[in-house]
Image: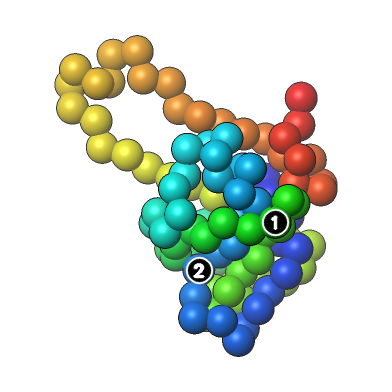
Amino acid sequence: MACVTEANLRYEGSITIDSGLLEKTGIVPYEKVHISNMSNGERFETYAIPGKPGEICLNGPTARKGLVGDRIIIFSYCYLDDNEIKGFSPVIVKLDENNNPAG
């Protein structure tokens, strides 16, 4: 789970995610992501933009979906054909309270 570090209502939309985490997970800038807020039960879709180390910022309307300090799960999906499914392994990155990869 990531920890929301900022909520910026005065922005067009999206979620800003530490660019190192984007690289580690394979999420590309402007890719659609699903967010589940463990603190309030909100679930929503938006797109990812790269940010500074440790940064997880809810932008625009998504800023209404959570508060600084909320713990969220960020999901990214892909479509696979039968040949690609064999040997596929999802990327799961667990984070500490400072949004650093844990363990």
In this rendering, the answer to whether 75 lies above or below 79 is below
Q: Say what secondary structure mark 1 lies in.
A: loop
Question: Which quadrant of the figure contains the C terminus?
Answer: top right
In this rendering, the answer to whether 51 lies above or below 9 is above
Residue type, label 1: Lys
Quarter location, residue 52: bottom right
Residue type, label 2: Ser
**Image coordinates for residue 61, horizontal then vertical, percent:** 52, 80
Q: Say what secondary structure mark 2 lies in.
A: strand
In this rendering, the answer to whether 102 lies above or below 65 is above
For this rendering, which residue is in front, 28 or 3?
28
Q: Is residue 66 left or right of residue 88?
A: right
Residue under label 2: 14
Q: Of the residues under marks 1 and 2, which one precedes in the sequence? A: 2
**Image coordinates for residue 46, horizontal then vertical, percent:** 44, 65
**Mark 1 and mark 2: Cα distance apart in space:** 15 Å
Coloration mode: rainbow
Q: Is residue 52 left or right of residue 11?
A: right
> Residue drawn 65% across and 78% down?
8
From this viewpoint, is residue 41 visible? no
Residue that extends furthest to the bottom in the rendered view of this protein: 10
Dot 2 surroundings within 10 Å: few (below 14), some, or many (20 or more)?
Answer: many
Question: Which quadrant of the figure contains the N terminus?
Answer: top right
Dot 1 surroundings within 10 Å: few (below 14), some, or many (20 or more)?
Answer: few
Residue that extends furthest to the top in the rendered view of this protein: 87
Dots 1, 2 in contact, CB < 8 A = no
**Image coordinates for residue 7, horizontal then vertical, percent:** 68, 74
**Image coordinates for residue 43, horizontal then vertical, percent:** 50, 62
Q: Is residue 39 left or right of residue 87?
A: right
> Residue drawn 24% across and 21% down?
84
> Residue drawn 62% across and 34% down?
93
Residue under label 1: 52
